[in-house]
Structures are given as C-alpha cells and as structure tokens.
Amino acid sequence: MTDTFTEPRLTARNLELERGERLLFTGLGFDAAPGTLVRLAGANGTGKTSLLRLLTGLMQPDAGEVLYKGASIAKLREDYARDLVYIGHMNGVKDDLSAVENVRIAARMGNIIAPETALVDALSRVGLADFTDHLTGELSQGQRRRVALARLFVSTSKPVWILDEPFVALDAASVCNLAQTIADHARAGGIVIYTTHQECDIPIEPEHMMTVDVSAFAPGRVRKPAAQGEGSHA
C-alpha cells in the first residue's frame, strides 16, 4: 500500500555546475510540489546525471541551492536522506548476497522493515520471481539492475524518489509495473525525479508532470521555465 504524503516539496534554485573546467548549466531551477513527476530531458552530456546527484546531496553545486520543505538539503543532511530513495547508474548490489538479501539490506539501510513476502513480490514485479535466492554475482548485468530497482517496491514510505534511467533492462511487464508504481507514488503526494532515454508512458494526469530541459540552462542559452503537462517524453 502506498503511503500518502502532504509535505514534500523539492526546489532547485539557480543551480550552476562546472565539471572538468566546463560549465554544464547555470541558473537552473524548478519547483516540485507534492505529487509531482519531474522528467529531466536533454542530450547526452548536458548534465542530467550530475543534476540528479546535486538533488540527492551527493554533489554540491558551484552556485545555487537545493531546498527540501523550504530548507537547504546541505543543512538537513540526515533528515533529507531519510526521506529519499536514490537509484543511480551504479546498482549498489553485493555479489555475495542473494537477490532477496540485497533488497532486504537496502530496505533496512533506509529504515524499512519489510516482510519476506514483500521482498519476494518486489523482485517478482521486476521479472525476477525465479531468481530470488540466486547470488547476485551469478546474475547478468540487466538482472542486477532489476535487483536494484526492486528496492522501489518496498520504499513507498519514502517521499522523494530520484532515479537515473530506471526503465533500462526491464521487460515490457516490468516497465508497466514500475511505471504504475511511479504514478501511484506521485498520486499519493510523493515526488519522483527521473531521467530516461526510453519512450515510456507513466499513467498520471498531465498537470502532475513537469519536464525540465537541462540543455536549456547551458551557458548562452535562453532560459526556459519547466514545462507542465508535456507527459513523460522529452
């Protein structure tokens, strides 16, 4: 069952980031109210993954700030981390543990105690019903990615989800399951911020969707506000 949230609000204010002596973006901002699905769009190399890391607090901007419930995440630290689920490019799974053990440990690290049935169901929903007891090191890279994504299905109590290419390596049924779970999370008042190169329809009302084109904030580009109601495609 998805929790219901009323308070989460994530705001990026005038963010600027330089990597390798190259200014990726400047003046980047958006405001995600409770129940908002935010897709980060833009060509490769524009800084989408770096922006996700700024939004998690794993990286610091060269200018600007990220606010959660009106306070800087740099000051909130653990309080923000408790409300956050981040799945990046690195899967973060341990090869010497089984698939179900990996999901259990990831949940516990987020202070989530999930029953065994919930853990198995989470793996089933990403197409790993027959691999729950397999060592993760024996699985393919695609299956390892699915183990990481299974964590979302036991993390509905976390208001903020930040996801880097969550639909990669999923079959059609698993894509539908994940898309529905993301929609349910937003409808409950959660915030989901994600990147994707895949065409994937997330079943949620257009007024709850926002597209942020990171490339629009490249140096010298005319600033554009975040677009509402553009659906889940760039």
Image (tube, rainbow, N blue to C red):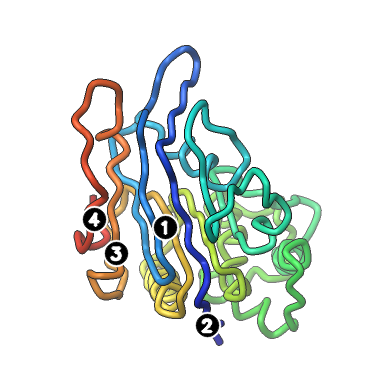
Which mark is on residue 233?
4
Residue toward you, 73 or 169: 73
- Between marks 4 and 1, how big is the CA–CA gap? 13 Å
Does label 4 or label 3 sit earlier along the sequence?
3
Closer to viewer: mark 4 or mark 3: 3
Which mark is on residue 209?
3
- Between marks 2 and 1, how big is the CA–CA gap? 24 Å
Q: Amino acid at mark 3?
A: Met
Closer to viewer: mark 4 or mark 2: 2
Q: Residue at x 72, y 67 (%)?
A: 107
Does label 1 or label 3 sit earlier along the sequence?
1
Residue 98 in which image quadrant: bottom right
Q: Residue at x 43, y 53 (%)?
A: 168
Q: Residue at x 30, y 75 (%)?
A: 203
Q: Amino acid at mark 4?
A: His
Is residue 3 shown above or below 84? below
Crowd tier of the residue under label 3, counting other residues whose Cα lies within 10 Å: few below 14, some 14–19, many 20 or above: many
Instruction: Tell whether label 3 touches label 4 (CB within 8 Å).
Output: no
Crowd tier of the residue under label 4, counting other residues whose Cα lies within 10 Å: few below 14, some 14–19, many 20 or above: some
Q: Secondary structure at mark 3?
A: strand
Residue toward you, 20 or 74: 74
| Residue marked by disc 1 | 167
Q: Secondary structure at mark 1?
A: loop
| Residue marked by disc 2 | 4
Does label 4 or label 1 sit earlier along the sequence?
1
Residue toward you, 227 or 125: 227
Q: Position of residue 166 (x, y in %)?
A: 46, 56
